Image (spheres, helix red, strand yellow):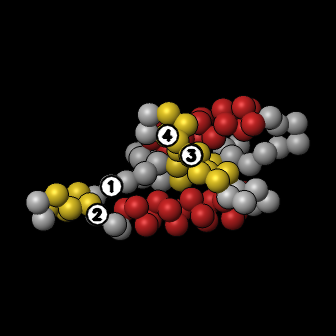
Amino acid sequence: LDKIGRIGGEEFMVLLPGTDATLAHEIAERIRIEIESSPLYNNEKPHILTVSIGTATVLEDDTLESTMVRADKALFTAKKEGRNRVIMAS
């Protein structure tokens, strides 16, 4: 049931139906750690990648768009606070 897709530029969205905020944060953190610990090699030189992630869960009166806006704000906060982190939307 989970879905992932590119929504523009370097931004991707992962939909995790039936997942609460705590589990979504744990999944995002596992993704962040896996990316950071899996260097890409070019001419045998390692390149460390990092990822900033904003998470949001659907609230009672949310639409997909309003949930995406909150996730995008959380992503902006993750970047602003130093990158390579997961921030949960409020």
Query: Mark on residue 39?
Result: 2
How far apart are the alpha carbons under marks 4 and 3? 9 Å
Question: Amino acid under label 3?
Answer: Gly
Q: Quadrant of residue 59?
A: top right
Question: Amino acid under label 2?
Answer: Pro
Whichever of labels 1 and 4 marks the residue nearer the N terminus, that label is 4
Q: Position of residue 8 (x, y in %)?
A: 50, 33
Residue contact at pointers 4 and 2, CB within 8 angstroms: no
Question: Amino acid under label 4?
Answer: Glu
Give the side of residue 10 with respect to residue 65, left or right.
left
Question: Which circle, 1 or 4, is nearer the viewer?
Answer: 4
Quadrant of image for the C terminus: top right
Query: To which residue does mark 1 refer?
Result: 49
Residue at 56% x, 46% y is 5
Question: Which circle, 3 or 1, is nearer the viewer?
Answer: 3
What is the secondary structure assignment of the residue under circle 1?
loop
Residue at 33% x, 55% y is 49
Query: Mark on residue 5?
Result: 3
Whichever of labels 4 and 3 marks the residue nearer the N terminus, that label is 3
Residue contact at pointers 1 and 2, CB within 8 angstroms: yes
